[in-house]
Image (spheres, rainbow, N blue to C red):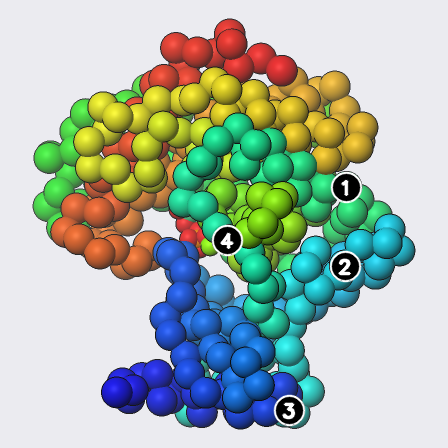
Amino acid sequence: MRSDETLKELQIINQFDTGQQARSAILWGNGHINRSFLATMESGERYILQRINSAVFQDVDGLMDNIVSVTSFLRERIQREGGDPKRGTLTVIPSMDGRPYWKDEEGFAWRLYANVERTVTYEKAEDENVMYQGGLAVGQFQALLADFPVEELHETIPDFHNTPKRYQTFEKVVSEDICGRAASVASEIAFIRERREEMSVFVEMQKKGQLPLRVTHNDTKINNILFDEASQRAVCLCDLDTVMPGFAAFDFGDAIRSGASTALEDEPDSSKVSLSLPLYGAYLKGFVEGTRGRLTEEEIRMLPMGAKLMTLECGMRFLTDYLQGDTYFKIEREHHNLDRCRTQLALVADMEKKWEQMAP
Ligand code: GN1
Ligand code: MG
């Protein structure tokens, strides 16, 4: 039997210009922010319907404008190189009135993408080939967008990877301690505080113009990469909400954080977490190859720091949310964000032990 909610989703799909009716919709994916559904149409064609989290993304027009222009640019480039743009990039399906999203009566914004068929995602890398392929795809994403006018992109979440700013917010939340949880996480707080100096590295380099700003994805968690089911080649990056100007090291780092760990992001036993150097090395190789010689020496040198800071920043964000009462990241159990924080901090600690071996 269909739940009322799914019925609602079926009706929403009819607001989009697919030329057909939807037959079924099921909840889909493991994202922490938006709500996604896989919809099957009468013809058997499938689409991904998403309700955009407007608490997180306050400028939906700017957000969708970014996605439409970046995917159109990619489509043209992929075509020019003889690739298949239907697999190489997401395709936004416009609403019946020709807009890139549709607003329901409660004010929620919805969008529809064509589903990229015969693909799979991984919550963590299965083997070195998956990481190598993931690196290639993310590197190539940056290479294909190298001529995209960066200044035209909207900042969908201001200061998204401004780690020192994230730290300021974290300190504020610790001092307010609205849920009375700070005392129970004193060692995690101390771990983060001990590393506050390092957090400014990228912001400082930006001020001095030492790194080029590129079009980056900014959320290259391994499960945001679609892999071909048969060949295991990475075909497409999804979750484009945070495509913004950024540094190459962010997209390197976030994939290492999620893909090169020996445990899942929310593993409750953080002693199982370590950095797999073979997985790290495989992604590094793929990423550098994928960027097609575009990275400067300085950018390559900063890649390990990207891995460390993206992991530390993410751990700090999970702890911030835990202290604030779990309002940002979706949770499925009581201390979910705390478990997530602990895995990230354990990974940072292990990276510090392996720092020399992480050099490119
Ligand atoms: C969120 O949406 P999702 O699950 O791919 C988050 C990322 C975090 C990630 C941690 C917009 O990504 O920044 O690194 O969770 N996205 C946003 O798993 O905050
Ligand atoms: Mg996602």
Q: Position of residue 186 (x, y in %)?
A: 16, 29
Q: Are marks 1 and 2 in contact (CB under 8 Å)?
A: no
- Which three-letter amino acid code belongs to the residue tagged 2? Asp
Q: Is residue 347 above or below residue 79?
A: above
Total labels drawn: 4
- Which three-letter amino acid code belongs to the residue tagged 3? Gly
Q: Is residue 321 above or below residue 211?
A: below
Binning the other alpha carbons within 10 Å of mark 4 as few (below 14), some (14 to 19) or many (20 upward) gives some
Q: Earlier in the sequence, mark 1 or mark 2?
A: 2
Residue 19, numbered label: 3
Q: Secondary structure at mark 2?
A: loop
Residue 143, numbered label: 1
Q: Position of residue 42 (x, y in %)?
A: 53, 88
Q: Is residue 273 above or below residue 326?
A: above
CA distance for labels 2 and 4: 17 Å
Q: On the rendered image, what quadrant is the N terminus found in?
A: bottom left
Residue at left offset 22%, top offset 56%: 332
- Classify mark 1 as within 8 Å of ligand 2 or not, answering yes or no: no
Q: Earlier in the sequence, mark 3 or mark 1?
A: 3
Binning the other alpha carbons within 10 Å of mark 3 as few (below 14), some (14 to 19) or many (20 upward) gives few
Q: On the rendered image, what quadrant is the C terminus found in?
A: top right
- Pair 4/1: label in front: 4
CA distance for labels 3 and 2: 23 Å
Q: Is residue 216 left or right of residue 219?
A: right
Name the residue that disc number 2 marks: 84
CA distance for labels 3 and 4: 27 Å
Residue at left offset 30%, top offset 26%: 273
Binning the other alpha carbons within 10 Å of mark 1 as few (below 14), some (14 to 19) or many (20 upward) gives many
Nearest the camera: 9 or 196?
Answer: 9
Name the residue that disc number 4 marks: 120
Q: Are marks 2 and 4 in contact (CB under 8 Å)?
A: no
